Image (cartoon, coloured by chain):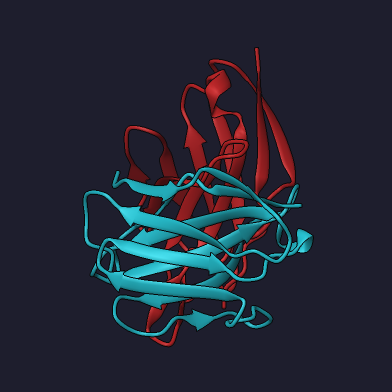
Amino acid sequence: GAVVSQHPSWVICKSGTSVKIECRSLDFQATTMFWYRQFPKQSLMLMATSNEGSKATYEQGVEKDKFLINHASLTLSTLTVTSAHPEDSSFYICSARGQRGTDTQYFGPGTRLTVL
Amino acid sequence: DAKTTQPTSMDCAEGRAANLPCNHSTISGNEYVYWYRQIHSQGPQYIIHGLKNNETNEMASLIITEDRKSSTLILPHATLRDTAVYYCIVRVANQGAQKLVFGQGTRLTINP
């Protein structure tokens, strides 16, 4: 299957700081990328969907000003958690899909964020 | 949006076939059934997907009933590394963007 990478794999930051997470599709062009969040012992929750070159579509209850998403190219999307607080500590997972609507969605390995 | 129902947990002996059921009784005619799995602290891994016909790949087989209201994922010879949470997902469409919505999945434990 296709490869999606994330960086960093884990990050620890102080409360009030901002953290950027990168998601890259390594061997295909990702027209659409998705960002999920997963708390311990829970399932994945979709945060937002982004298409290359356009603004992201956020799920209900997700603050777009807090979770900034940029999908500037067909191989890179970034998620910035602004003014992070301990309750933002979670496992963030990105996913990417190719240009066709029937293309399979592949997931990155995830980024563990801990806010102190 | 079609929803899926899966057993919370299942056990299977190593070397045996693991059969994971999924109900999706409200599935629409153009919605696919996808299966992913998530090993602890990793991102989900794609396994297989199908629309109407049964599908097989190097990882698993997917059996979809004729009325498409349920399906079964089959891991033919389970190994310890197959221990994971398995998600059955019916793909939904929203604003032209196809997205995957995860339920709680089935926690499959392969026992030696």
Residue A26 in view (yes/no)? yes
Residue at 52 percent of width and 67 percent of height: A80
**Of residues B69 and A18, which is closer to you in this image?**
A18
Residue B98 coordinates in the image, percent (x, y): 41, 74
Asked if residue B46 is positioned above or below residue A100 in the image, the reply reads above
**Of residues A90 and A59, which is closer to you in this image?**
A90
Q: Which of the 4 quarters of the picture holds residue B110? A: top right
Total marks drawn? 0
Residue A42 coordinates in the image, percent (x, y): 73, 53
**Of residues A65 and A106, which is closer to you in this image?**
A65
Asked if residue A60 is positioned above or below residue B109 in the image, the reply reads below
Residue at 59 percent of width and 82 percent of height: A65
Asked if residue A93 is positioned above or below residue B10 in the image, the reply reads below
Farthest-out residue, top: B112
Residue B69 in view (yes/no)? no
Residue B45 coordinates in the image, percent (x, y): 46, 44
Residue B39 coordinates in the image, percent (x, y): 57, 36
Which chain's colour is cyan?
A
Residue at 45 percent of width and 56 percent of height: B34
Q: Colour of chain B?
A: red
